[in-house]
Image: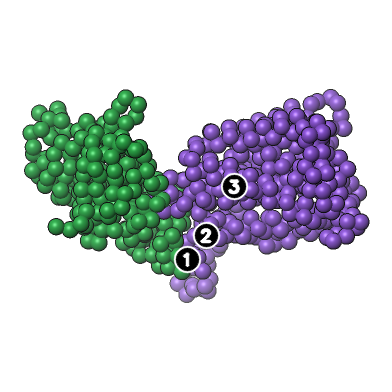
Amino acid sequence: MSEPVVETRDLSMRFGGVVAVNHVSFTLRERELRCLIGPNGAGKSTFFKCLTGQLDPGHDGGRVLVRGQDVTGWRPYRIVRLGVGIKTQVPSVMNGLTVLENLWLSARRIHGKAGADGAVEEVVGELELGPIARRSVGELGHGQRQMVELGMVLAQRPWLVLLDEPAAGLTGAELERLVGAIRRINQTAAVVVVDHDMHFVRMLDSLVTVFHQGSILIEGPAEAVLSDAKVREVYIGSRAA
Amino acid sequence: MIHDAPSAGRIRWGWFIAWVVVMAVLPLVFDDTHTLSLMAITALAGLSLALMWGYAGILSFGHAAYFGLGAYTYAIAAVNFGESTVPLLLSIVVPALLAAVIGAMMFWGRIGDVYLGVITLVVSLILFKFMNATAGDAYKIGDARLGGFNGIPGFQILNVPGDPSAQIFGVPFYYVIAVCLALCYLLCRWILSTAFGRTLVGIRENELRVELLGYDVPAHKTAVFTIGAGMAGLSGAFFAMWAEIVTPGVFALGMSAEMIVWVIAGGLGTLIGPMMGAAALTLLKLMLGQQTLIDNSLVLGAIMVIVVLLIPKGIVPTVAGWRSRRERSVASRRGQASGRKRRTVAVPATPGDGAGSAS
């Protein structure tokens, strides 16, 4: 079995009296694709923010390890510099800049000035961003902004990719393009996808971890997990009935 | 060659040369170089805030702290050294060092924008209060008495380096400030054209995203905060030479507020706008100072309200927007006209009577 690329040990995150993540121990291995799902308030986005350094669980909040290195409490940029690509829940893009400028800023840190243009060109081709390349990101629709942000992650050629709700607001064709892109990324990188779109999770057909009330409820292959009675009860709820 | 990089650093050399020529000619047209010098000094202070606020998104509510610290540093050092060269350099270094320390604490400490404004404001108020309370004999740095609310008078003004007796004042003093202003403008443009500057623009647009791309955002913000404070310190030193006295008023809340109005009125997100805003409002303030009918602060407050309501982008971006819309509309009309002409020629009434001649 390959080495873990991400590991959390007894991770907890509290906001005053509210325990958003409760003693979660989680492992992701090389080139693994994992979906984290759960109903609203299950703690998956808080867990994601602890992984990416956007939230600090504190001294007694457990540990986060990336390739064996303890990164608990690190600022996001230090975690990213290890080779981690992060896409946030709400598209986090630079609205006043064009698509190319957004991608260039991402590519420049890894590839330098000399290689940035080439890397940008590659990503534009890969995600079919050509027709909108010179448009200001602020003018784009939600789905296009999602793809631009994914492009910014791809431009850094990470070995671990953390995607928070990448399918939110995407149409059918865009969703298929996204699934294809994630599969291509997964050929060279481990990927964590946080989402609650069951159709999208089925399309990815990966291992699934279900969060419920800040803890891991169950882990397993998508079809098995999604047909589990407990999952249907806490996650699908009335829609399953 | 960078094709896809954010383009904040591009300089329009034609406009720059025209601006330099105007600055060079002004003393030949207007006798009052004292006023022209003050306009150039405030333009430099406006430029320093324009860089850190307009391009890196750092709103310093207490920018007068660095302006005032530059003025005091110059005055204290000039009293002790008896010449102006080293004091002038110290007036850049000391405010820059203070900004580096405060900036590092704020930006690595994950302080939010609101608290950042409060902290910068409090720093300027502390300096204001402290300098007001330095009237006693105990408050001396070398030979320089801080002088409390009376301030420090009678220090060496600008001189030719190495020759304290060759003082520079009047028209030459204006030209020295004008050259420094132009050089600082070029420095800002150069900074914005580098990868560092492009990252700053990214930070202004979306700080979290830039951090998630792996850039050390606190280091970038601390660096630009330090550079801006150094430039503000330089303008403060020139102000001290211009006034030939430094009082705690340079740290006053009103001074910080004026700087914010200069930037908003001139146009946030540009360099030339805040410089023009600073110069124009300084001139207006001096003109208003000659009358007693209306209070200066009331007029400046009214200008800020009017600008925010009517031209929220500021004067320069609004004028630039009008120009580009006009150019687009003219180009579109020309395009339509030539299209009509082409159609008229290229689609003749009968085959063979001039088809193809249009091309």
Q: Residue at coordinates 91% horizontally, 58% vertically from top-left? A: B166
Along the viewing direction, whichever of B257 and A182 lies nearer the viewer: B257
* Disc 1 residue type (three-letter): Lys
For label 1, count other residues whose C-alpha is less than 10 Å away and answer few (under 14), some (14-19) or many (20+): some
Residue B135 placed where, x, y %? Answer: 80, 31
Q: Which chain is mark 1 on?
A: A
Q: Residue at coordinates 56% horizontally, 48% vertically from top-left? A: B222
Residue A150 in sight: no
For label 2, count other residues whose C-alpha is less than 10 Å away and answer few (under 14), some (14-19) or many (20+): some
| Mark 2: secondary structure | helix
Q: Is residue B270 left or right of residue B198?
A: right
Q: Is residue B323 above or below residue B160?
A: above
Chain that appears purple: B
Q: Quadrant of residue B89?
A: bottom right
The residue identified by callout 3 is B100
Q: Is residue B324 above or below residue B2?
A: above
Measured Cα–Cα span from mark 3 to mark 2: 21 Å
Please tell me the numbered disc located at residue A113: 1
The residue identified by callout 2 is B195
Along the viewing direction, whichever of A177 and B80 lies nearer the viewer: B80
Along the viewing direction, whichever of A152 and A126 lies nearer the viewer: A152
Chain that appears green: A
Measured Cα–Cα span from mark 1 to mark 2: 8 Å
Q: Is residue B186 above or below residue A215?
A: below
For label 3, count other residues whose C-alpha is less than 10 Å away and answer few (under 14), some (14-19) or many (20+): many
* Disc 2 residue type (three-letter): Ala
Q: Quadrant of residue B279?
A: top right
Q: Is residue A177 left or right of residue B146?
A: left
Q: Quadrant of the N terminus of chain A?
A: bottom left
Q: Residue at coordinates 86% horizontally, 29% vertically from top-left? A: B291
Q: Are marks 1 and 2 in contact (CB under 8 Å)?
A: yes
Measured Cα–Cα span from mark 1 to mark 3: 28 Å
